[in-house]
Structures are given as structure tokens and as C-alpha cells.
Image (cartoon, rainbow, N blue to C red):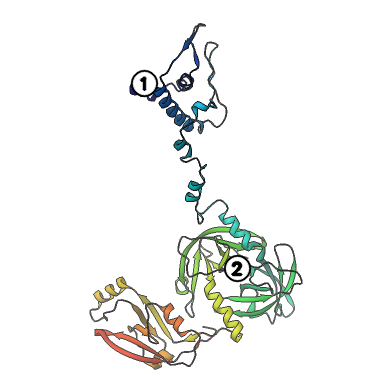
Amino acid sequence: MKRFLKILSNCGDKSFIPVLALAAAGSTVVFTGNGTSSRTSISVSVPQPLKDTLTLHLTLHWTYMKDKLLRPAFLSGGPSQLCIFPLSFARTGLEPPENVKKEGSGEDGDDEKKHKCCNCFGRDTIANAAAAVGPAVVNISVSRGFHGLSAGRSIGSGTIIDADGTILTCAHVVDFQGLSISSKGKVDVTLQDGRVFEGTVVNADLHFDIAIVKIKSKTPLPTAKLGTSNMLRPGDWVVAMGCPLSLQNTITAGIVSCVDRKSSDLGLGGMRREYLQTDCAINAGNSGGPLVNVDGEVIGVNIMKVLAADGLGFAVPIDSVTKIIDHFKKRGRVIRPWLGLKMLDLNDMVVAQLQERDPSFPKVNKGVLVSMVTPGSPADRAGFHPSDVVVEFDGKPVGSIKEIIDIMGDNLGKQLKAVVKRANNATATLTVIPEEANPDM
């Protein structure tokens, strides 16, 4: 038997496979000679153990071969050759064993549930995310002019985030600084379903370039769900939506390239800001539109791109936007405490390098390095010096600038204790009182 199977596996003539199958099934095989018209009928009797082994071998082989036969192909030769068609085995005796049938067939319900992946990226992932947010994405058009002279219209995007008609967009889209001269706070809002509304600019934060527009509707409005941006990682899939070049309902997909791109990295002055960087296609008109995760949640507001490059787009993280909206609701404006420090996050590798350059550098594992102190600022009056390492702020250990900002919150005029490490591991405790930052900074 082993010798017979060895001959079968080494057989180069694939046309021999159907013949062996018929033989295993107990059928009569007809051989036709090459170049002759003679026909020979041979009855082949196969022992039962060999028959079962042959059946399994041929079934597995045919499972592999049938995937390669995309259409009913056949081999045709001269009048003396027998045409060979792909075979369909329907006999009960040729059914594969039960364990072979279940393996990889998808017929077993338990196996299907076990291998089903709920969070896998599939063919409908992007489409489903876009469908969840798409109806709430709007086109925003603003008339531009000066002293009664029309200068065209500004086009941007926005997202309806509340059923009461609250729309999230960018301040530069609604021309917030020039509203009193041009559009007087009024904008045109067009929904994906074709409805057009007159919107009113309610508030804006020029620091983060975020604005709120309100529309009134007697019929229900679609809304988008706000997610969270603090769980994003580089490489996560995202979708950018909006109306680039007035092309409404445009969707582009890409990944998150960086989750904390600093404003200083982009050459932007003023107070520190962090953006989400993405390689989604973002063009003129995308500003104010949503950046969406694969769960169909808004995780950012598209704000700008680098003109001299492709695949370098930026969005304001939705967590920052949520804080801005909370400030609008509480005080009608955004309050940002200011210390007057330029700082740098430290880690083990940076600390080791600084200690190698300067043996007197304080022995710390983490902290925030003060690189510059603004003269006359609250930090200057408190006694901060360049090269100080902040290790504790308001009684809590800190290892990043973000932690210091979060601890300050929106507290103004409150005394905060800061513990700093200095050269030769000296320790100092300073008291600083934050002031409100200049909105133009």
C-alpha cells in the first residue's frame, strides 16, 4: 500500500487522478491508447483499507485543486485522446471523514465563534465609521468683505455635536476676528441631506482655533458622537471628513502619525499646544471637519496641513476641544493660567545624557526641565531659574508638562507649591501664583 501511495504522490500526470478516483469508487476504467483507436476495458478491484486511504488522499488533493480551477476548463487533444473535465464527487463513499470536513470548513458553529474577531479591520470598517458621522458633517460658507465691498466667500466644514444645533468648527473658518466687519456673525450651513440654515457664531477660542456655531431647526438634526483622544496610538486608523474645495461629503482615510505634535515643532509661537498628526488627505475646505476613529467617534477637529508636503495634516485633539466647550459653558470664554516658563519633559535617557555633559546635574529619574524663564512673569517672581528640574507640583509628583498644566487647571490667583532640584542635587520649594494668559500669546 505504501508503495502504491508513493507512486501516486510522485505521479506527474495529473490526468491520472480522476482515473484513480474512479478505481477507488469501484468503477470500470477505460484507457485509450496514444495514436491508436483501440480501447481497453479493465475492472479494477481495490482492497477496502487501500480504498479508504485512497479516498482520503484524493479528497484532500481535489480540495486543493478545485480552488485553482476558476472555470470549467478541460484538456482537448486529437481524436484518439479522452477529454478530462474537472470532476464533481457526489457519491456517499467519497465524503471525507468528519474531522476533515470540520477543519477549516466554517461549518462548525463553535469554531466560527472562536475565530470570529470583533475588533478586526474589515472591508466595511472605514465605510461604517464614515456612515456613522457623515450625516452630521456640514459645509460652512462665510461672506468675506470690508466696508460693504464683497471679497468672495470662505468655505469650511463643521460637525453637528448636539441635537439643539450646536456645530463644532474652526475659528478661522467662520472668520471670527473679522465678523463685525464682514458677515456680522452669520454663516450659511449646508447639511449632507441638502438642507440649508443660517448659523450664528456663538463663541470661539483663537488660541486653539476652535469655534461654536448654532443653527435652529424644526426638524430633527443628525449628530456625531464625541470620543476620546487620549487612547490614540501612532498607527491607529482614522478618517478625515469634510468639504475640501467645496466638494461636500468627501472622505479620506489614513493613520495617526503622531499623537502629541507640539506647536513649537511646527514653528508656531505663543503658548504650548499639541495636535494630532495624520496622513489623511486634508485640503482647503477640510478645516473644521471631524477626524473620526474606526468606531465612528469624533476624536479631533481638522485644522491645517503643511503646504509643502503631502500626508502632513493636523487636528486639535477632541479632549482639548471638550475642555474648551466646558469653559464656554461655564464662563463664556477660555481661561488659561500662565506661569512664564519654557519647559522640557525628561526621561531616563535624556537625564543620563545631561549628567554625562554636566556632572552637577541633579540626580533625578524624571521631572520637567526649566529651559527659560520669562522676565517679570509669575515664575520669575517665584524664583525659578533655568536648569531647574520640577519634580513636584502642588504636592503631586510630576514627570511631564501636561501633568503640570492639568494640575493648574483653570485656577487663577491660587498659590501653588513647586519642588525643584538644582545643581549638585540641591532642593528648593517655590511658591508661584498663576496669572491669566494673554489671549494674543
Type of residue at label 2? Lys
Q: Identify which residue is drawn at 50% across, 26% down.
A: 93
Element assignment for label 2:
strand
**With 268 as the anchor, is 53 left or right in this view?**
left
**With 97 as the anchor, is 392 left or right in this view?**
left
**With 81 as the anchor, is 173 left or right in this view?**
right
Which is more foreground, mark 1 or mark 2?
1
> Quarter holding the N terminus?
top left
Return the x and y of residue 63 as percentages of the image width and height.
48, 32
**With 310 as the anchor, is 11 left or right in this view?**
left
Q: Residue 66: tell me if it is visible.
A: yes
Q: Identify which residue is drawn at 54% across, 71% down.
A: 318
The front one of 181 and 231 is: 231
Query: Farthest front residue?
Result: 48
The front one of 363 and 393 is: 393
Query: In the rendered view, would you say 83 is above or below 168?
Result: above
| Residue at mark 2 | 225
| Residue at mark 1 | 4
Q: Identify which residue is drawn at 45% across, 26% down.
A: 55
Residues at badges 1 and 2 in contact (C-beta under 8 Å)? no
Quadrant for residue 297, please give it: bottom right
Return the x and y of residue 435 as percentages of the image width and height.
48, 90
Q: CA distance from mark 1 to mark 2?
A: 67 Å
**Label 2 CA crowd tier, 10 Å (few <14, some 14–19, many 20+):** some
The front one of 337 and 441 is: 337
Query: Farthest right residue?
Result: 218
